[in-house]
Amino acid sequence: MKPHTISNESQLNSNGRLVHLLGLKGLPKNQLEKILDVADGLIGSKGNLQKSKILRDMSVANLFFEPSTRTRNTFEIAAKRTSAKTINVDLANSATNKNETLMDTMHTLKAMQIDMFVIRHKQNGMPHHVAENIEGVSILNAGDGINAHPTQALLDVLTIRQHKGQFDNLSVAIVGDIRHSRVARSGIQAMKTLGTTDIRLIAPETLHYKEETPDLERFDSLKKGIEGADVIISLRLQKERMIAADIPDEQTYFDNFGLTNKILKHAKPDAIVMHPGPVNRGIELESSVADGPHSVILQQVTNGIAVRMAAMEILAGAF
């Protein structure tokens, strides 16, 4: 299923309340800002995360059909910090490996009184398919194929808002494997909704979108693309989704698209550098940038917990 054919309509009920978080395409600005505001309210003045008891009577199941460290762990931490009971389904030894269908697994988990499913899947649109075919359970999309990664995009725009305040006058440069990145796709949707119009895509031709993007400026030069940028988002090379011809070799990629302190001087002096992780040092970023004063990568991780807490609380009907 191609990303542009996937609808997020089922994430809002007839009263306009968010009952699933499947993607950010078409999500109203007020809904997006509500998640950011709730997340911001969960972060103390010293950056410490608050705890709540909002999900104390609920159970959350994490179902990761693709490998994950940051996303899976932060979802688990978020659920526990909202007092939910959490279940990490052992998919390697689950009944799906005994030819049980995915939907049979979902219905079985629902029968176990699970209230919320966090789903990551390699197939575009799989969380949407589950949401459309099961009732009484909220679905949180933790990443589906190359289609969407809504909570990553939300934590990214929360981090941007904390540093830059507004979105309408920002210049945002997205660098790297854009073609295979669900992070980029969701991030672009979120920033457009929040009012950003200067979004630049910087990549070798083989890693740009195949489809035309007339409202997004494309660059094949990192130096030109980040000129005067307020925000630089470096993307992980999605080697698991690539073919060998997508990049010549890692050193050549770094020489042309790796972010270094020398290149960073072409952005604004107060530019922030972001990355969804895990960072491939010496390929996407040099260590002096990843660990330097412009980097907000670790703040993104903390914000990821706050955003996932906020999403769960909103889906539970608390706001």
Image: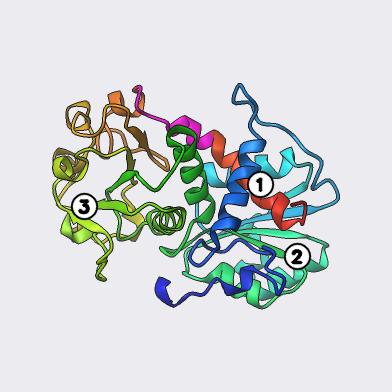
Q: Name which quarter of the figure residue 138 lies in.
A: bottom right
Report the residue at 73% width, 40% height from top.
80
Report the residue marked by disc 2: 109
Report the residue at 32% width, 32% height from top.
271
Report the residue marked by disc 1: 310
> For mark 1, does the 10 Å Cα neighbourhood hold few (<14), some (14 to 19), or many (20 or more) residues?
many
Image: 306 above or below 96: above
> For mark 3, does the 10 Å Cα neighbourhood hold few (<14), some (14 to 19), or many (20 or more) residues?
many
The N terminus lies in which quarter of the figure? bottom left
Report the residue marked by disc 3: 203
Verify whether residue 109 appears in magenta: no
Discs 2/1, front: 1
Image: 146 above or below 312: below
Discs 1/3, front: 1
| Chain part drawn in magenta | 293-301
Q: Secondary structure at mark 2?
A: helix
Q: Amino acid at mark 1?
A: Ala
Q: Earlier in the sequence, mark 2 or mark 1?
A: 2
